[in-house]
Amino acid sequence: MRRRKFIRQAALATGGIIAAPYILPTGRLFATTNPQMAEHVVFVLFAGGVRQQESILQRYLADSQQIDIEGNIMYNMFKGAPPDLKIAYGTTLPGGQAGGQPISPILSTTLEEQGTLFAELLYTKGGTGHYGGLSAGVSGHYGLTQGLRQRPLHPTIFEYARRFGGYKATDVWMVGNGIGGSVPLLNHSEYPEFGSKFGGNFIAPIVTFGAKEYIDGFKVYHPDDELDPIRKMQAFLNQTFLLQSGELPGINNSNEEKEDIKKFIKNTFDRLEKNQVAFPPVTDNGDAVTIGFATEVMKYFKPKVTVLNLSAVDVCHGNFTGYLKSLHRADHGVGHLWNVIQNQIPEMSGNTAMIVMPEHGRNLDHNPITDENDWFSYDHNGDANSRRMFALMVGPGIPANLRVGSESNPVGDATDIVATMAEILGIKPDVQGAGLLDGYSKSLFDRI
């Protein structure tokens, strides 16, 4: 084999590993016989810490900056008119000034009208930290002794789906917005009876497809005069594999799955080069880019379970204007995602349920940091307001235009999503029978 061809093929194989480090064996001989509400479920972790005031309550600046302007900046998801003054959440003006023209709605009918909104559910246990919230969302259990660089201590939806649903590894995907904050550890737990053999695939597309100088075109480096690029490639792979933490989980994918992932990597690079990736119309932050690549995963693999993590709103720690813009863009991205599923992926159209929920809320009182508009910022230190959340679900069998719960009557818990997804997929009796969900956890359908 010629040297160039060999290196190209080796690089392609490496690309597959980068995109999905954990490709794992099927967990069950026969799939569940329980009725399904939908064959596909998508869970969007609207993460980074979202305050009820600027989302569900549509208070805009009224409850944060003591400026009497209200309005809805998430109008793909929720009903309500946008603010008519101090527009700081729209596209950037020339010269870098925030604001300008708000992004046009993608959906003609809001997701709230299409589905069921739990307007006030609670994060009931432990601290309101990002990784703890994400772990609770995908495992249905509060990891009160959970370490930051530790896998969930209880099984995740990926493991439940593969063990009880009989799905193969390429049927379940965790799409992360990066490889920081222990996000790549969410695709399976440490629980002995589940674990890696039932885990899901993980991809951080901003990392994988953002490294064009290393992978795109499968460039050949000569060790005699291009040692520096080789070392940079090594550093990139080490970062992607989290080798700096000493972790390199075993890879056990079938030959067919390996080849399929290689084709997906090459296909996505080709589509990226031709501007064919289905990015949202406004793609000016990492969340929007991640959503665009998530649609590519769905188009290619048609996953049974897809979990998508967003986090740009975490800028609220030091920039409230940026937080408003990120909320607006995340709503834009979620609307785009649902639109693509319904109109560009025939295998998932009309047969997919989607759930959207933050990983936790944000504090009631501001911190001392102000931004370019002299607006105060907000942390999430575990006060009562940071435990207030919402959940929105839409799809087959989900009641339309139904609102459940209120500030005076919260309904639901942050750990309810796993049981809800299990019910949609027809494996709820198996999941609940395992006895590993939080004691307070229920399917959201049981709370209606």
Image (tube, helix red, strand yellow):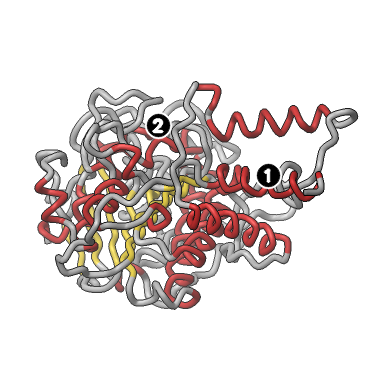
**Three-letter code, disc 1:** Ala
Relative to 211, say whether 190 is above or below: above
Relative to 141, say whether 389 is above or below: below
332 vs 223, left or right, is left
Residue 3 or residue 279, whichever sits in front? 3
x and y percent of residue 284 in the render? 62, 53
Tell me the quadrant of the picture where the C terminus can be found. Answer: bottom left
Q: Residue at x 31, y 66 (%)?
A: 353
Camera sees residue 328:
no
Among numbered discs 1 and 2, the one appearing first in the sequence: 1
Q: Closer to us: mark 1 or mark 2?
A: 1
Q: Residue at x 60, y 29 (%)?
A: 238
Residue 133 or residue 259, whichever sits in front? 259
- Residue bearing mark 2: 379
Q: SS of the residue at dot 2?
A: loop
Relative to 80, say whether 28 is above or below: above
Q: Residue at x 40, y 42 (%)?
A: 66
Instruction: Locate residue 378: give its quadrant.
Output: top left
Instruction: Locate residue 167: give its quadrant.
Output: bottom left
Relative to 383, say whether 121 is above or below: below
x and y percent of residue 308 in the render? 42, 51
Instruction: Locate residue 82: give its quadrant.
Output: bottom left
x and y percent of residue 154 in the render? 23, 35
Label 1 vs label 2: CA separation? Answer: 45 Å
14 vs 438, left or right, is right
Q: Residue at x 74, y 54 (%)?
A: 94
CA neighbours of label 1 inside 10 A, class few (<14), some (14 to 19), many (20+) = few
Camera sees residue 149:
yes
Q: SS of the residue at dot 1?
A: helix
**Three-letter code, disc 2:** Asp
- Residue bearing mark 1: 10
